[in-house]
Amino acid sequence: MKLLEIGNLVARYGAADVLKGLTVDVDEGEIVTLLGSNGAGKSTTLRSISGLVPNITGTIKLAGQSIVGLKPEAIVRLGISHVPEGRRVFPGLTVRENIQLGASNRKGVTRRALEDEVDAMFDYFPDLKRLEHALGWTLSGGQLQMVAVARGLMAKPRLLLLDEPSLGLAPLVVQQVFRIIADIRARGTTVLLVEQNAHMALSVADRAYVLETGRLLVSGKPDELWNNPQVRAAYLGGLSAA
């Protein structure tokens, strides 16, 4: 089943078109990754899905329902959660408080249920359990990324949008983050991933789209893309850049 369908999407910042007729889709249960050099339009695609780019044309559908023109909070309630680049954890709040914020758009959740769900996130991310009362500003980059992902999952999304989850992280932490991404899908959440590390992204993805200056360059399964000379040349020339 097509969970996300984007058709002929044009996104503008001011007078400049950042996306120029992009068409992509994501099946329920997949991990799909968007690759491309800096300025290709990857993050703009996620922001457009989340309702954060007001000037767009084309279609964006979640499970067949158009979400174009909806406010970000309405899109979250329909089942899309966005973990943006840069993590954006509140430095003056504790780890527990930051994670709780992910449920802020869910109506009727009791305090007890919310606490239980945060505890479940600590089971999911055991490295955070001992840090639950630590303030955001004291955390390492990897810890911040785990808090950001846990916060995104608190919205109970059908589709999780991840923007550059490995950015600035040490190699061992990157491997841990990608194990978590694979586990998220195994637990039933579909993932659309924007990632600077093409090797890691393709190691967990079912399919990938390669963008170039706001347009689709090529798409396919990971092994097809690695065997595509055009894609390999692009990768060696900087496809792994954010």
Image (cartoon, grey):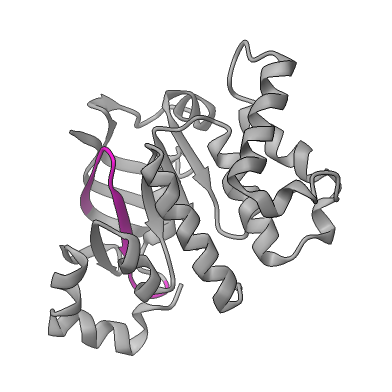
Q: Position of residue 19 (x, y in %)?
A: 31, 57
Does the rendering let one see residue 13? no
Q: Position of residue 25 (x, y in %)?
A: 22, 45
Residue 96 colored in magenta in the image: no
Residue at the image point whose x is 63% and y is 41% from the top: 123
Q: Position of residue 134 (x, y in %)?
A: 85, 50
Q: Which residues are magenta?
A: 22-38
Quadrant of the drawing holding the N terminus:
top left
For residue 185, which quarter of the picture? Answer: top left
For residue 167, which quarter of the picture? Answer: bottom right
Does the rendering let one see residue 174? yes
In the rendered structure, the answer to whether residue 148 lies left or right of residue 82 reads: right
Residue at the image point whose x is 69% and y is 57% from the top: 144
Q: Position of residue 75 (x, y in %)?
A: 45, 29
Taken as a whole, is the magenta stretch helix, strand or loop? Answer: strand
Residue at the image point whose x is 50% and y is 44% from the top: 82
Residue at the image point whose x is 34% and y is 79% from the top: 239
Above or below for 100 versus 65: below
Above or below for 221 versus 5: below
